[in-house]
Image (cartoon, rainbow, N blue to C red):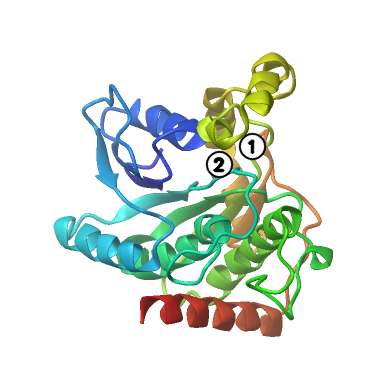
Amino acid sequence: MALRTLIVGGTSGIGLALAHHIAAAPEAIVTVCGRTKPANLPSNIEFSPIEATSMRGIKKWTGNFKETRAGNRINLLILSQGTSNFTGRDETNEGIDRKMALHYYSRQLIVRELTPVLKEDAKVLFILNGKEGSPAHINWNDLDLKRSYSMSTAAQQSATMLDIMVQHYAAVQKGDEKRHYAHVYPGGVLTGLTRAWPWYMRAGVKVVGPLIAVKPETCAQLLLENLDKVTSAREKDGYFWSNINSDGSAIKDKTVWSKSQRECLAEHTWRTIDSALS
């Protein structure tokens, strides 16, 4: 179990459930980040406020985090921030759609800024949809979806871009770096994200949800129980990236993206983020 863990989006749902499971080990030190501090946190879970839709806010937050935790490197970085609202494209004042900012761009900036404080064998988990990303679900001519946005395309595009970036990060490691990057599919999880839904949909979830979804605690337990086994098996085969299913198993037959595809997406990502920061 990781001793020092940072969970962005760890204030509710699967993120908070992961925090509690990890913190059950007395030696663990966990930091959860989000807008609102969860109630009744154990003594070894710290809270750090963050506005994860803002690239400038993230840049400032990561700078403060590195400064205040000098010498304490991270074993496990979990990125689970998200939203499930049903609005159309809604840009921040930095020009990025809010859903894509949470699901994709903010996560990349956090990884870039915090890489210097990750241990050489750290694990980085992107929790979104590691199952359904595919070449059919990415528009290379409109990566930020400014011209072709819909809720479904935003979800598919973000999931596919995360698939590509876990492979990119694994490929560009240098020297003794053996970090493992994974894109996790949590499946149907009963989370607090439904609070952004219309009242009639929330009412339906209360009735049907327990029949088709699992509790965040169950999802967290399955992921953590199988994480080391899955990543170790992948690394023995020479892969420092994984896609992980809701039962904690490795998702097989995922597309392996080419170097040119990985570099194309990385270039777009940093150009978009750096433009927002300027």
Q: Count neighbours of disc 2 (C-alpha within 10 A) and say few if under 14, some if 14 to 19, many if 20 or more.
A: some
Q: Residue at x 67, y 82 (%)?
A: 259
Residue 145 lies, in percent from the top left, at: 67, 70
Residue identifier under label 1: 248
Res 100 seen here: yes
Whole-percent x and y of residue 24?
35, 25
Where disc 1 sits, the SS reads loop
- Reading the image, the residue beneath label 2 is 227
Q: Tell me if residue 179 can be seen.
A: no
Left or right? Give the position of 53 relative to 182.
Answer: left
Q: Amino acid at mark 1?
A: Gly
For the point 57% across and 74% down, the residue is 171
In percent of the image, x 74 and y 59: which residue is there?
Answer: 153
Q: Residue at x 15, y 57 (%)?
A: 68
Q: Is residue 9 above or below residue 241?
A: above
Furthest residue in direction right, as rendered: 136
In the picture, which quadrant includes the N terminus? top left
Res 36 → quadrant: top left
Q: Is residue 159 found left or right of 25 in the rendered image?
A: right
What is the C-alpha distance between the residues marked 2 and 1?
7 Å
